[in-house]
Amino acid sequence: MHEPELDIDAAQREVLARIEPLPAVRLPLTAAYGRVLADAPHARWDLPGAAVATMDGWAVRSADLLRADAGPVRLRIAGESAAGHPSRATLQAGEAARISTGAVIPPGADAVVAQEDCTRNDQELVVDRGRVGRFAAGHFVRAAGSDVAAGAALLPAGAVLGAGELALLAGCGLLEVAVHRPPRVAILGTGDELVPPGTTPAPGQVVNSNALMLALQARAAGAEVIDLGIARDDVDGLRAALRRGLAADLLVTCGGISVGDHDLVLPTLLGLGGELVFRRVRLRPGRPTSFLRVPGADGPCPVFALPGNPASAHVAFELFVRPALLRLQGRDWQRARRSVTLTAPAPRDARRAHLVRARVVGDLATPLPDQTSGALRSIAGHNALLELAPGTCPMEPGASVKAILLGEPCP
């Protein structure tokens, strides 16, 4: 078996070169929450559709105030423009119209004076020019199309649709939108030693907690999860489970990819016609991570065969599976990175990059005390992966390192 071993960046490039976004579907806005835009929708009209007031007060012609000195300006009151009830009468020279916030500026008017800068005497409005201060056309006016112009692109393809984004689309006249459907990812645990969560393991058995972890990581990346359960170390049963998984958009297996007599996953995938893209990555933890494309019901299915140690599976999913899932949705897959300062020593590996699980608070990073790939504690309580280049000596406290942020750092 050819076993190419790549560095992390090269392995990511090999994955992403073989992943295309899923076809778009059109959904009503009410069903599109959390989905990812497949194109850039455009506004059907201006927003706002007409010039509107940003202050309760009086619509005026700016020329009437600009001709005056700092003394009072007397204007005749001529009607009102209320929100939802615009005035259709044209404001003449020397006139003012009552106006509320959000109401359309009457024809002829081009500015608004705040009500606290005026005094009303029956049908006469007295404007305190000194209180108004600097003044020009457009004062307390939001111009038509100043928020969004008709025909403007509203959001880029790849944007995730939250409440604010959907409100923008609705306000600009859209009823439905083209989005990528969530990818369906099948997850299969392998090994005679596995028992389902909730089962008390006998000696030699372990709970299949990796499947839960990977399913939650997949859901966080926007995927729908198909739980294939556990495949025993039996070629026929494993082959049948893998074939079920190949009907998904992406298949993840966990365990069974070493070189022992009972490590059957890779030979079985190759027996199903799989093309091996890479077999190992210069990475700790997660070196045995493998990536294949295997014929499925709708063409080649990307398959990630992950190691069985929990830290290895967790890190490999983050580095390779998550980017593939986001690419299937047309989304940017890069995590935020930042420089952080170590508060404690961080171990390195002499031959490969070490992704150290750490807790980042502000600009400080504390590596978890246990970095053993088989220890569940080594993946609990961290919010970042520290990227440490190969080396023989640990990184000392005070050193600056790069961190991949898995969530928001603690303040």
Image (cartoon, grey):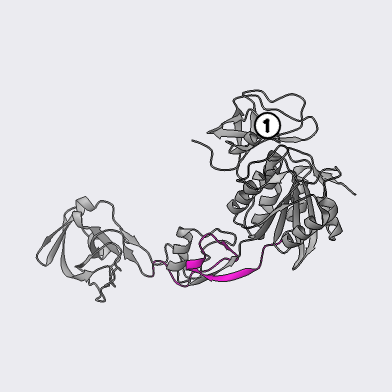
Judging from the image, what secondary structure is the residue with disc 1 in?
A: loop
Q: x and y percent of residue 253 in the render?
A: 73, 51
The region drawn magenta spans 20-49
Going by the image, does 40 lie left or right of 185?
A: left
Q: Position of residue 41 (x, y in %)?
A: 54, 68
The picture places residue 189, in percent across and down from the top left corner, at: 71, 50
Give the residue at x 63% y 60%. Answer: 329
**Quadrant assignment, res 344:** top right
User: Which of the two residues, 381 or 27, is positioned nearer the viewer here?
Assistant: 381
Position of residue 400 relative to residue 287, above or below, is above
| Number of residues whose C-alpha sits closer than 10 Å to that of mark 1, classed few (under 14), some (14–19) or many (20 or more) | many
Magenta-span inclusion, residue 236: no
Is residue 18 something one can see in this rendering? no
Pick whichever, 346 or 227, lies toward us. 227
In the rendered structure, the answer to whether residue 43 lies left or right of residue 370 reads: left
Residue 303 shown left or right of residue 112 in the figure: right
**Farthest residue in the front direction?**
202
Of residues 223 and 41, which is closer to you in this image?
A: 223
Q: Main secondary structure of the magenta part?
A: loop
* Residue topped by disc 1: 371
Rendered residue at 71%/25% (across/down): 394
Measured from the top left, where is residue 164 in percent x and y? 45, 58
Compared to residue 386, the image places residue 19 above or below, namely: below
Please tell me whether residue 33 belongs to the stretch shown in magenta.
Answer: yes
